[in-house]
Image (spheres, helix red, strand yellow):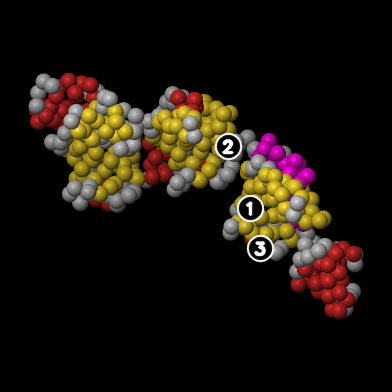
Amino acid sequence: MNQLKEKILEQLSEEELEEKVKEKTEKFSGMLNKEAALFLIAREQGIEIEEKDTVLSELKKGQTVNVKGEIISVYPEREFESKGKKGKVKNILIKDNTGTAYLVLWNEDTEKILEKDSGKKIELTEFFVEEFNGKKQLNKRFNGKFNLKENQKTKEIKKINEIIDGERNLTIKAMILREFPLKEFESKGRKGMLKRIELIDENKSIMLVLWNEKAREKLSEKIIKISNVNARKGLNELELHSTDNTEIKELEEGKLKEYCINFFGKKELNKVIEGNRFIAEGKINSLNKTKLLFNVCPECGKSIQEENNTFFCKTCGQILKPEKRLVVSFELEDETALINTMVYGKKAEKILEKTTKEIEEKTNEIILEEIITELNEAIKGKEISFLAKAKNNSFNGETELVLEKLL
């Protein structure tokens, strides 16, 4: 702004410039700041103005800027009433290579950018920077204008680490790392379903939430292509959420182990840190002599309480018939250390190469110690590779591993 002022002062005196700035700001009822007034005066004086684009990360409250970006999300317009007059407002989230900001459109301009324009390039000229709840907003000034352009990269497949909060109609290619049980719920008198699936590509993992009928989809451990999903912040991290138009296609066989090693990294057992997820490799030293079968809630899979032959789940309430869940504890050994490892459900079945039903039938025939001895002989020395999470055992205070995914 100082350079622009200096150019104007080559033609006008300081007093003349101050008077013209005062005229401009009064003419526009205080809606024009000093910087914008200087731009108008410069044009009237025939001074050429070099208009540079401003990147979103460098926006400052009070600036008048030109910006180029891409539309991430178009939010529904809202109607309002102020001083007896009705109006409309619409927020649009845009991004460039440096960050994001909100474009705010008013009244007739709200109809010029629609939901279908997500993914298009946008150029803004003479927009004023404001701030609301700590987020930068771009508002069109009197001489402001904007242009939309088709983005040739709109349909490109995105990497997980490129996804930005608020992006819509995304397409990604990834592998299924973990699939959680289907859950049914009721909200405001309406029933629904959801399933959470952790996905991973070459660089990062992310949680995909499938809603209602999409939650029923049967997925395999191939690379899948997911189209028309929206990104939004979950409780802790960014998530992907399905829409009515979400499509999931199975592609080629994937290299899940390579993806996991690349993102989580491998770790020797003597370097385990609580809370970390990593790839662990070793051989089974021996099964621990612990209970193998536990009663769990058939709805949510959580442990349940029993009182007088009646079963209760803290989440789901009273249940008629519990479900048996296989839980295996064993010592894992590599060249550096020995560490206790816990495995649950289907993953435990794969380790033992027996089903939960087969184990349950055996417990009716022979005592637990004999079953464990028999199983131990079958799997002792078995080499495994898996995605692990290290946690603290609250009973003995020692660090142990939870097997999340066999590789």
Q: CA distance from mark 1 to mark 3?
A: 11 Å
Q: Which callout, 1 or 3, points at the residue further toward the start of the chain?
A: 3
Report how many numbered discs are placed on residues in the image: 3
> Which residue is tagged 3?
60
Kind of residue indicated by mark 1 = Ala
Element carrying mark 2: strand
Which residue appears at 64% of the width and 43% of the height?
Answer: 75
Residue nearest the observer in this picture, 207 or 151: 207
Q: Residues within 10 Å of mark 1 (few under 14, many from 20)?
A: many
Quadrant location of the C terminus?
Answer: top left
Give x and y (percent) for residue 154: 65, 38
Give x and y (percent) for residue 321: 26, 24
Q: Is residue 260 a member of the stretch shown in magenta?
A: no
Q: Which callout, 2 or 3, points at the residue further toward the start of the chain?
A: 3
Which residue appears at 46% of the width and 41% of the height?
Answer: 206
Can residue 309 be seen in this snapshot?
A: yes
Q: Which callout, 1 or 2, points at the residue further toward the start of the chain?
A: 1
> Which residue is tagged 2?
170
Element carrying mark 1: strand
